[in-house]
Each structure stands twice: as C-alpha cells, then as structure tokens.
Image: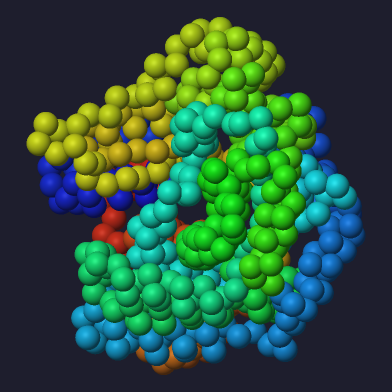
Amino acid sequence: MEFITALEKACKFIGPDTEEAAHLRSDCVHLLKHRKMPPSNITKEERLALDDLRKDSSIIILPADKGRATVIMNKSEYQDKCSDLLNDSTTYCRLKKDPTNNYSDKLTKILRPLKDQELITYEQYRTLYPTSTEPPKFYGLPKVHKPDCPLRPIVATRGSIMYQTAKFVANILAPMVGKTQHHLKNSGELVERMSQVTLDDDESLVSFDVSALFTSVPVEESIVIIRDRLTCDSSLNERTKLSPLQVTELLRLCLTTTYFKYEGKFYSQVEGAAMGSPVSPIVANLFMEWFESRALTTFPNPPKVWVRYVDDVGAVLKSSLIEPFHHHLNSIHPNIKFTKELEENRSLPMLDVLMTRKDDGRLKFSVFRKPTHTDQYLLFDSHQPMEHKMGVIRTLRHRADHLITEVDDKNTEYDHLKTVLSIAGYTRWAWQSPGRTKLIPHPRSSTDSRPKGHVTLPYVAGVTEAITRKIRNTGVAVHSTPCTTIRRLLVAPKDKTEPEDTCGVVYHLTCEDCEAQYVGETERALRKRISEHKRESSPVAQHMQTYKHQPGKKVTILDRESRWFERGVKEAVHIRSRSPSLNRDQGRHRLPPIYNSLVQSRDLGDL
C-alpha cells in the first residue's frame, strides 16, 4: 500500500499522465511483483517477549527525555507523576467538557475573513481550516538524568484543530528569532563563540538554566512583545500578507486554546506554551530575547559573555558576582526562575560540549555525555536503510571533528566511538567509509538543483533501493522509513482514540443481511461520516431502503492516513482490491489499471 501511494505521489510531481510517469509505474510494478520479502531479524522467542511486554498493562514503556535510554515504569507510578503535574493549578485547569468544537468555531471565524480578503490563499485556508476533531493528547517523558526521575510534560498537538495554524504562525515568526548577539543556533556555534574567550583569574564559567521554560512563559506579555517585534519587522510583507495585528490574533488563539485529553479527562493549560506545539519554541525564544536584554542592561556589571540556546545559558563573569547576578536574574519576572551550575575541576558542560579552562585562561572543548547517556545507536543489523546506518557514523564523526579542539581529546573520542559502534555491530569498513552515506545517487538537473517533490518509501531490503533509484532518476527526492520498530510496538503513552472518533481514515462498511460493501474515506471523525450514510442520497442508505436491509454494526478501519492525496490513493487501492458493490465510482483518485495485478493478487500490507 505504501509503495503504491508513494509511486502515485511521485507521478503527481512529474505529471501523472506523462510518458515518464507511465515508465516509472511500469518499472516499479515489475519490481514489486517480483519482490522477495527479507527474513525476520528477530527470533520467535524475541517476538513473544515483545508481545508479552506490549500486553502487560501494569507497566508503561517510554523513551527517556534525553540520553537515548528506554524507561520501563510501573504504570501507577507514571500516573501518579502525571497527576502531580496536572494538579498544579497555576499551570493546568480541569475542563468540564471537550472544547474542540468551541475552539474550532473561533478559528473558523478568524480564517474566513482572511480568505475572503485574499490575505491567505485558498490552499492555505484549506490547510488551516479545522476538520479534525481529535483533541491533543498529554503524556510525560522521564528525565532520567534528574533525581526522582520527574516527567517532562508533552502535549501532542499533531492532527489537532490548531496544529496547522500554529505551524503557519511559527513560519511567519521564525525569521525574527536569533537577531541578537547572544543567540546560539547549535553546539558548533557555542564552540566557535567561546573559543574567542580568555578568562581572567577572578572570572568563572557558569551556566544558567530556566526552570520549566515552556510552561513558565507569560502568554500575554509574550504576545505584546511579539506584536511589537512584528510591527518593527520591515520584511514581514515578504513572508505574509497579514498585518502584525492579524498575525498576533492567530498567535493569541494558538496560545490561549492549549487544551488536551488525559485518561479521558480534558484539561486546559492556563499559563505558558505547550511543549509539542510548533509555535511554542518560537514564542519561548522571542520572550527570552526580551528577558535577557532587560536582565543584562539592568545589572551594573553584566557578564563578559552571555550566550543562550533556548533555556540554556553559558556565561563568563566575575566570581564574586555570580550570586548577586543569579539573584538579579530571578528578580526580573515572577514566572522565570534560573538554576545555576558552576565549573567543577575547571570544566563546565553546556549542551553536548564540555568546556575546560586551560592554564592560559583560554578554553578547550570536548564532547560531553550525561552519566545517564546509554551510548545506544541504531544497530547495524537493524532492518533499516544502509544510508541511515552510515548517517549515524557521519553524525558522530562530524560532532567529534567540529566540537573537539585538542588532538588527544579527538583521538580519545574516536576510540570511544569505535568501541560503542562495534558493540552495535558496525564493521571496520563502515567506520572507515564515512563517504558512503549517500549510497544511492541523487541526480540533479543542470538547470534546476531543486527536486520536483519528496516522497517516503517503506524500507524493504532489496526492494526499496531499486525503487528509490527509479524515482530519483525522475528528479523526485526519496526518503526511506522503517516499516516497524520496537518503539512503535511498545511505546504508547497517549490516550487511545476510539475507532469511531478517529479522523483521517479509509473505512469499510458491510450490509448485515447480504454481501454488499462500501469503501470510503474521510478526514473528519469516522462517526460523523458514518452518520452521513443515513441520508437518502447515500448509496448505502438507498441499498438499505430498497432491500429493507440493516447496515452492519461494525465498521472496519482499513487505513489511517491524515494526508489528503495519500488517503485518496489508498481509498482507490482498497476499492480496486475489494470491488465493493455499493460504490458508485472508483474513488476520487484515478488509479491506473497497471496496478491491478498487484492489488488483486497480493497482500496490500507490504505494498
């Protein structure tokens, strides 16, 4: 199914009715018809063990907040910690009912005038228009590097009514971030900036960290700060036709409609920005730019160096001023409180860098790992693309090459990486061949270096590589993703959505009294779409009325797919495969007949 969907997406980019698209379909269908599925890379015993873990309702399995660790917690302990977070009345408030429809109406009321005035395009309006009714979900990630393993609260907003609007606003605001001398983009910039610093004997390295920045950001003040920045932004009209006030109105709606579902109950976040919303990091950064400007200009002897990555700050200042300055920081705003960390043995970690003071006052840099870091990386025998595995080596070597400044430290890091990668099954040739990260060439036209589009293929060894080459030869970029991972099998911390409340599905209806079937798709809640089949104009309703039959009580979800084009392809494939008698047509996507031999004779699950 995923191969056919990706192929049709690629053909859309190159022209679905072109000769090139016909050749691509023909070549790839031939490859799929003759494919051989690779053997399983786990034993029967391992599969049974995974199944036992998945069914054990007394535990919950989560990725750690940092450090690539996997955490198994008693479910009761996890629930207690989530309850402790949600019982903080300064941050969260229990709601009496689901506010989705109310918030949806508010968003629609703002969007329609923007579309009518042509301030947003019709395509943008369709993207932002709220159709899904699935609420955001709350869960927590264990901070294993901190005492008592507290949880970092996450609100999963993808697929919710405000997600696309938050993403839209974030894209407008993002270029304003980082316009200060204190902003850091990454660890490499930290090394570059701090390499130019020489510490005097009476100065110290110190780091400051904002406690729970996202849930502490003052919403109303942040909106005012951002509105003022937008008003002064001369390049705003290059990114959008919206005025600063209109952007601010959308931002306010994003920040004041933060709600979520946890264990069947609804909550509202009364302060701060939700960790999980696309706009939250932007808002947090812009507020911190205002905050640090005020903090640094109102202290008599500000730090010689102050560099910040979101909520992590590295500073150099007089040793005698550390405590007064720390007190000053915590007096600026009642919501924003900093913790501090002093250098120990002339060293101080920040991000994934360890800064060490040398005898001459200059700094050297090496890779820093928290004690809880597991050194676990993608196993070499995992059923994943070779370019992903080589990408692990490339990333680790790049970090060592660009963050470490002393030759001895670099050699030590290389030895460490070789050891941990060897444990993960990586061979010597893999380490020695970092240039093999792009094993499948990406052809580029001499006149246009940009791909015509992007598609994602499921990874099946021996099949995906061949189809990837075919698609890339048409100028479409291809990415691969594993079909199944242990994380997908075991990690499920969010509230489950009931089938009838699921949005973005291809579904199957059967008559209770005969073999009549119907296959359809909907981006809205399945419950709402099924109710529409009771209308007289519906072929399902007409069948029931004509033959006095009863509709089947069970509706089957055949596929979950939030993307409009992809969902249409999957609907067409299922219609072609099942030939449902109640469908009046073959679906909204015109599926070429070349796929018939695939969809009618093979299991759709691995296509």
Front residue (pair 277, 480): 277
Side of 176 where 305 appears, left or right: right
Q: Position of residue 477 (x, y in %)?
A: 30, 39
In the image, residue 601 above or below residue 35: below
Answer left or right for 397 relative to 566: right
Q: Residue most toward the left?
A: 447
Q: How many marks?
A: 0
Quadrant the C terminus occupies: top left
Q: How is the image coloured?
A: rainbow
Residue, x 70% and y 41% (percent of image)? 319
Q: Quadrant of residue 567?
A: bottom left
Rendering quarter of residue 3: top left
Counting from the top left corner in percent of width and height, residue 158 is at 53, 63
Whether residue 352 sits left or right of residue 244 in the image: it is right
Q: Residue at x 53, y 77 (%)?
A: 221
Percent position (x, y) of residue 574? 43, 58
Near-viewer residue (457 or 351): 351
